[in-house]
Amino acid sequence: MKAAPHARVKRRPVHGVILLDKPLNLSSNQALQKVRWLLRAEKGGHTGTLDPLASGVLPLCFGAATKFSQLHLDADKTYETTIRLGVQTTTADAEGEVTAEEPVRCTAGQVVEVLDRFTGEIEQVPPMHSALKKDGRPLYDYAREGQTVAREPRLVRIHELQLLDLQLKGDSPFLSLRVKCSKGTYIRTLGEDIGRALGCGGHLIALRRTRTGVFDLDQSITLERLQAFNESERLDQLKPVACLLDGHEAVSLEADEAARFLSGLRRRGGWPDSKRVAVFGPPPQQEGYTQPVLLGAAHVRAGELIPDRLLSPIEIAQALSLPRALALS
């Protein structure tokens, strides 16, 4: 007896951003595909990966928002993490095999001193179990084959390293930290390096991202809650595309100028030079819509507004069916 075929989900244009509180044991892409299915969205992407063993804020971009997701890759991040001291593993986290065990003899004062040394600009050697590519292949591919390849150290910045809790005695000594850091920081490597500096080694047993750029956990929604909503309520969770352009100077154009800008033409005006500009057009002449409409991202040089990434007229027309999708806020 043949199994009944699965009903095919009819996709549709969806534009905006879902701030997901990603659960443990899901890759970023798996989380994206689950939310994409729930929204029936045609196109989706995320703003950088969050490991399956990490939970927390993961911005998911749909439709026109995918054009600006790259801008968010450079955002600073904040994590809360727990380092199990005295045990080293192959992957610097709880998923790896134990490679060494050492007694923990450090004091609370030594912990504070070591944390001070890891604050500011530091060098990190990317871990073998990472998605960083070498000769076109991610490092984790080599690691799975038992290979170790040379990696160049990279400079990252730890803006703040706050000690939340510690236990240096007993069977399971640990440190709990809050880390505010630049893009490209490997928290597993940081935990391993801190353990090494304390003379006992260590590995991560918990990792949660609490903030990325301007987005934090308070704005995020769990997968379970999103699944419990009906279709209309799910769409209500979409944040406007323009939320990805936070920190950009806002420029508003009149209708004629907006049409020329959308065609890719530079516009001249009295704007000061700026590397990051969010460009808006007038509200459409339709009932219930009073806010300016996002046209795209640009920069200003010598009084010229120069397009960088533009929405298409089709994307704008589709997004207007979702009243908040292209709004200024």
Image (cartoon, rainbow, N blue to C red):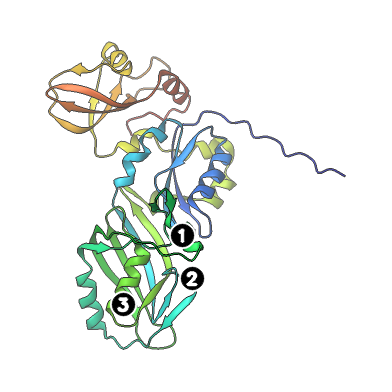
Mark toward the viewer: 3 or 1 = 1
Q: Nearer the viewer, residue 247 or 110?
A: 110
Q: Quadrant of residue 185?
A: bottom left
- Please report the residue visible at 57 percent of the width from the left and 43 percent of the height from the top: 229
Residue wearing tag 2 = 96
Could you tell me how far apart the alpha carbons at marks 2 and 1 are, in whole angstroms?
15 Å
Could you tell me how far apart the alpha carbons at marks 3 and 1 are, in whole angstroms?
24 Å
Closer to the chain start, of discs 2 and 3, is 2
Q: Secondary structure at mark 2?
A: loop
Residue wearing tag 3 = 196
Q: Is residue 224 above or below residue 95?
A: above
Closer to the chain start, of discs 3 and 1, is 1
**10 Å neighbourhood of mark 1: few (<14), some, or many (≥20)?**
some
Q: Is residue 104 above or below residue 230?
A: below
Relative side of 290 to 119, left or right: right
Q: Quadrant of residue 82?
A: bottom left
Q: Secondary structure at mark 1?
A: helix
Q: Nearer the viewer, residue 70 or 254?
A: 70
Q: Position of residue 148 (x, y in %)?
A: 41, 65
Relative side of 58 to 251, left or right: right
CB contact under 8 Å: marks 2 and 1: no
